[in-house]
Structure formats: C-alpha cells, structure tokens
Amino acid sequence: MPIYKAPLEDVRFVLDEIVGAGKLAELPGYEDATPDLIAQVLEEGAKLCEEVLFPLNQSGDGEGCTFENGVVRTPKGFKEAYGTYIEAGWQGLSCDPAYGGQGLPKLVNTMLEEFICSANLSFGMYPGLSLGAYNALSTYGSEELKQRFLGRLVDGTWAGTMCLTEPHCGTDLGLIRTKAVPQEDGSHKITGTKIFISAGEHDLTENILHLVLARLPDAPAGTRGISLFLVPKFLPKEDGSVGPRNGVACGSIEHKMGIKASATCVMNFEDATGWLVGEPHKGMRAMFVMMNAARLAVGIQGLGVAEVSYQNAVAYAKERLQGRSLKGTAHPDKPADPIIVHPDVRRNLLTARAYTEGARALGALVGYKLDVAEKHADEKTRKEADEFVQLMTPIVKALFTDIGFESANIAVQVHGGHGFIWETGVEQYVRDARICQIYEGTNGIQALDLVGRKLPQDMGRLLRRFFHPVGAEIEADMEREELAEFVLPLAKAFAKLQQATAIIAQKGLKDPEEAGAAATDYLRLFGLVALGWMWLKMVKAATAKLAAGEGNAIFLEAKIRTARFYMAKLLPQTNALFITIMAGSKPLMEMEEAAF
C-alpha cells in the first residue's frame, strides 16, 4: 500500500529560510499571517490530506466516476471528504473576507495545494477549478455577479469550471463556435458543446458555475471575438437558493488514463442562460486570469505527484532486500541488503529528491511574489513582482509537470516489477501525472509562450526580474571558497542561459521557426538554472544554521548533500541543452511532410 506524509519540515525551511515568509505580515491585509500562524494552518491542512484525502486516492482510482442518465457520481467517500473540506473553510483559505474567505496569503494556499495533490490529485481538481472561477469572477465580474455568486464559490457549496475546448479546436481558441445571443433582460442564451471539462458535472455541490467562452452575433473573427459568460447549472432564485435547471447537460464522461476520480465531461449548452463577464469580445483577457492561475496550479500538481512518488520510492528502497552492496555486505543481520545501498537506486532517488525540493522552493517563491504583486504598498515593487510571476508561469507549469512525471516513473523503476502492478500504488502516479503535461496548454505551448511572448516583451524587461537577482547572487558568492562547488556550476549554467537567450532573440527576429525549434530545450535550460539558484540559496541557509547550531542537523546536512548531487549530476544537462539549441531549426524542419 502507498504512503504519504506532508513534508512539513521542508516546507517550513523553504518558507522561513528561502522565501522569508515572515515578510508576508508586513503586507497590507496580511498582518495576521505570521510564520507561526502559517505553520499551524499547514499542519492542520496536512492532517486533512493524510487522514481524509489520501486514503481515498487509490480506491477512487479503482472505482472512478460513474455516468448514468446525465448524472455523474464521484467515488465512494469523495462527497463526505468534500463536506469535511468545505466545513473547515479550506475552499476560502486565500479568498477575500468580503465574500466569506479567510484572506490568507496565496503562498499558504500554494503550499496546501501541494499537499492536496500529493494526497489525492483527482480530489484536488474540484476545489481547484472553483478557485480558478473565483479568481476570474472576482477580477472581471460585475458587482451584481460578484454579490450573487462569489460567496457560494468561497464557501464551497457551489463549484466552478472553465469551459474552453470544443471538439474541433484545442489550443487555438479563435476557432470556437459556441454562440451567445443577447436577451432583453441583459442575459444571453448560450449554445454549443465543450469537451474535456474537468468537474463539469458531479455530486459534490448543489450547483456548478460554468465560465464559458462563446461568440456574440457581432463578434469579429479569431480570439478578438471571444466573450466570457457565467452559466450556472441551476438558475438561482432571488433569495440565492437553487432554482430551475438551466440548459446545461453533461453528455458523457471520458474514460481516461489517469485522474479517474475526477470527472472529465462533455458539456452541452442549449439556450442556456448566462451573463457576460467583463466586456464584450474581451473574454480572453478575463479567461487568462483563470488560465494563468491554473497553469501555476497545474505546476504544483506536478510537484505534489513528485513528492508522493519520491516518498514511496524511498520507503520501498529501504525495505526491499536484494543482492549485496558492491563494497561488501552492508547489513550482515539480513539475508540481503536493502536496494538503497546500490548506486543506481540512489541515483534515481536523489534525482527525484533534488528536482522535488528545488521545485518546492521555486514554487514557494512564485507564490510569495503573487502576494507581493497584489498587496505591496509600493507600485514599482508590485509591478516587478508581477513581471517575475509572468516570466516564471510557463516554466513552473512545464518544468514541474515534467518533474512530476519523471519522478513517478522513477518510483515505478525503483519498485521494479512490483511498481508495474496496481496494488503497490505507484503506477497510478504515472497515469495521473501524465495529464499535467498536457492540459492548460501542453508543455510545448508553454515553451512557445516563454520564447514568443515573455522573452521579447518590452525589450526583455521580464527577463531582468530573473537575470538580475541571479547574477547578483552569483557574483556576491563567487569569492566564498566554501560555496565554490555550488556557485561555479551555477555560474557556468547561468552563462549558457544568457548566451542562449541572446542567440534565440537574434535568430527569432529573422526566422520564427528558429525560436520555435529551440523553445522546449530553452525552457528546460531556464528551469534547471532556476532550480540551481534555489539550491544555492538552500545551501547557504543550511550552512548558516549548522554553523549557528540551530535546527535539525541531519535534515540540514541532507540539504547540502542533495544540493551537491544536483550541481554535479543534474545541472550539467544544461551543456547538452545548449548544444541542441545551437543546432537550430534545420534538423527539425528540413524533412518533407510526405517523408514522415
């Protein structure tokens, strides 16, 4: 049976020593968000995930969702677990107190999301989508819509979805055909079909609010003609209670490779009543609020799967007896040594660990910058934090989900044949993690966003939010002899990233395919350098605490050793990535289509 314990010690280390979460209480509105309060909240969240959500993960995978006569039922125990979740107020953790939320920092919610995704990724889809709908509606909804609907999203009695994809179009939303016809009362009639709608129909809440992209009759072609509408499953009455059924129905649910306890629906809208969110023909701007938040959330899903996969791989490696250490018997009291003594098993375990802990630090930093961008009193500081988040969003989404899938596969590999069977639980992580690399824009799309939008934006201004602090930290630490084995590899990789950035920018101006051909390798290169930056910070923090005689020495020494592995064994991938970037587009594009 699989195991899971929330990594509270590591999270506390990251929040206190790397992000400096104590500064959150200095932001307007977050005065009560002290490190002690944050720790207490996350401890309670960990209990929920370990004791309520995790026990349903494997059974939910085995049972899956069921669909009959338009009704979707989640697996046994999910409805009760959701009730526990909302009764404790977790849905509104980072939401505005004006609508019943607790008003805690987004960083706290980010850390909780990791725990939820480790414990039960399918379950996490339901409240996660509701939070995305809350973000879009609170930003672009009219005051009437906010007052009418936000409180129900915050308390979790109503859920939310995002309805983008249609049968004939995926990423290219300019091709959507769903139509919206204005009515005399200010509402609209929405007609069309949406596919791959996560949590589109379920039995967890009394109502579901769909945010739907559609076209008005006078809409211009392409994405410039898309509007966003709020379409409830049940129309609310004047007193706010659930009223008559709207023209929304689930046509079917998908039979999927993974996340089987999350209902992925085909949703049919037939003259459904909806209300415009934001301005006409400006729906993409409103939807991007939800999509960008979702991209960061999907990245955290990847991190969550990576963590639980690593934990199960380590537990098995310590228990499984097979062969003897290459240096001689390590455990003479046993008939064989546990496989954790073998170099290749350790390579696998340390790879998953180094990626996971580095990603956690980077994800926490992005979560902190989200709070700074929203709450800081200084406009320039808010803008710079927002630019950092913009730059890192495609990297977090793509890199973290790649890491999640890789770590899940590592867990299977460490388990050997036992990893390939359902009972041990780790093969589920591979199946669940795979979708994270696809939805909210495939990782290739994230790479194109990075090189096509983020790099050239305002003459590379966004890049400064990363390049300047990394360069400054490397320069400041270069003369510290005790850090040489960590700083020098990072400095070399950072130089490769800078060089690759300049070359892609130069070539991309002349030939867009040059930038496109380099995009995926460039994102990985960028991400590895970002994790290296986090590991340098963690080494410095761990070294300082050890020198001061503070903290758990075993934990801190493990940090330094994991950092050493990352710098010596994983960061050198940047050399090969740089070479492939320099190879240009010709090896990809010279093949004639007919030859494939």
Image: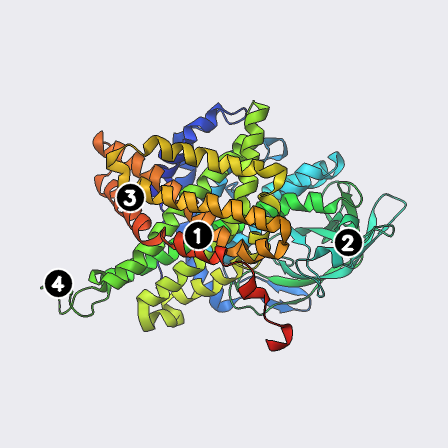
> Do tag 1 and tag 4 residues touch (Cβ < 8 Å)?
no
Q: Secondary structure at mark 2?
A: helix
As drawn, the residue found furthest toward the right would be: 184
Which is more N-terminal, label 2 or label 1? 2
Measure the C-alpha gap from mark 1 to mark 4: 35 Å
Which is more N-terminal, label 4 or label 2? 2
Q: Residue at x 79, y 50 (%)?
A: 225
Disc 1 marks a residue whose amino acid type is Gly
Disc 3 marks a residue whose amino acid type is Lys
Disc 2 marks a residue whose amino acid type is Gly
Measure the C-alpha gap from mark 3 to mark 2: 50 Å
Q: Residue at x 46, y 57 (%)?
A: 402
Q: Disc number at residue 559?
A: 3
Callout 2 crowding tier (Cα within 10 Å): few <14, some 14–19, many ≥20: few
Which is more N-terminal, label 3 or label 1? 1
Q: Disc number at residue 553?
A: none
Residue at label 2?
Answer: 222
Residue at label 1?
Answer: 304
Q: Which color scheme is applied?
A: rainbow
Q: Secondary structure at mark 3?
A: helix
> Do tag 3 and tag 4 residues touch (Cβ < 8 Å)?
no
Percent coordinates x, y for residue 362 in the rendering: 44, 42
Q: Nearer the viewer, residue 569 or 432?
A: 569
Measure the C-alpha gap from mark 3 to mark 4: 25 Å
Residue at label 4?
Answer: 327
Q: Residue at x 75, y 48 (%)?
A: 229
Q: Secondary structure at mark 4?
A: loop
Query: Which of labels 1 and 4 is toward the front?
Result: 4
